[in-house]
Image (spheres, helix red, strand yellow):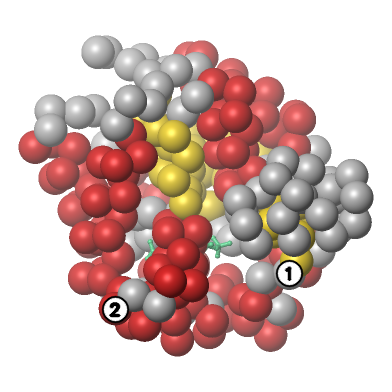
Amino acid sequence: MSGFRLIFMGAPGTGKGTQAQRLSQRDGLAALSSGDVLRNEIKLGTEIGKQAAQYVTSGLLVPDEVVIGIMLAALSRASAGAAGWVLDGFPRTVPQAEALMRGLHEQRLDLHGVLDFRLEDAEIIRRISSRRVCSKCQATYNARLLPPRREGVCDRCGGEVAQRADDREEVIATRLATYRSQTAPLIGYFSARGMLHVVDAAPPAEQVEAAVRAILGALDRGN
Ligand code: ADP
């Protein structure tokens, strides 16, 4: 699965971050999550973090002019020396997609595919409310379906596993509405370019991973 340059899109809670981490751990792709990049800026108290904080905690999108620069820079850092990459959570608007495509074009790099993870809202809400995240290495767990071996302790790094502030039920509705109005238009953008592949995100993670690998196996990488 190495050598791929991919975008994982889908509403929050569809499991795209979990699948990106799997490709990263098992195949050496760099997995870059815009949410993790922004939360790290907030934690460090940088200028960007200060601009982003209010949007992230209320479930709204951080403005394009803040996100585009930092994500393109993070991508070129993360991809150096990696066997390809998968972007999770970026692009999230059409202007972000246009900026990414321009950046790739300038570096003469192709995007190999966009995987769109689909799941119904009721299941999304169930999953997000039981989602837990390692506050140190960002590994994702599910309190019901995929808990860490020791409660509250990350399997990978021993960090503290807890609920994210924006995973509270009252913020989830805003995040879903934001997704439908601002991110769903990307489905048309990428499908018009023949890049979109739909993944049924409802089955257990192992099965979704097999579906992802089947799609990747059939992708034409050209270069
Ligand atoms: P999820 O996909 O589960 O909603 P993320 O961790 O990807 O969670 O994102 C958390 C928050 O970070 C979003 O609600 C938004 O405020 C901000 N964010 C992440 N990616 C972007 C982006 N590409 N553009 C604007 N805001 C973003």
Q: Quadrant of the C terminus?
A: top left
Residue bearing the label numbered 1:
163
Q: Is residue 197 left or right of residue 21?
A: left
For residue 70, above or below residue 23:
below
Could you classify mark 2 by the number of other residues whose Cα lies within 10 Å: few (under 14), some (14-19), or many (20 or more)? few
Q: Total marks drawn?
A: 2
Residue 66 or 7: which is nearer the viewer?
66
* Residue appearing at x 90%, y 50% in the figure: 150
Foreground pick, 75 / 95: 75
**Residue under the point 23% across and 28% down:** 110
SS type, badge 2:
helix
Q: Gap in Å between the C-alphas at discs 1 and 2?
A: 25 Å
Q: Is residue 213 visible?
A: yes
Residue where numbered disc 2 is placed: 47
Left of 59 or right of it: where is 156?
right
Asked if 181 appears above or below 24 in the picture, the reply is: below
Q: Find residue 153 and report its image quarter.
A: bottom right
Find numbered disc 1 in the image and state the secondary structure of the residue it sits on. loop
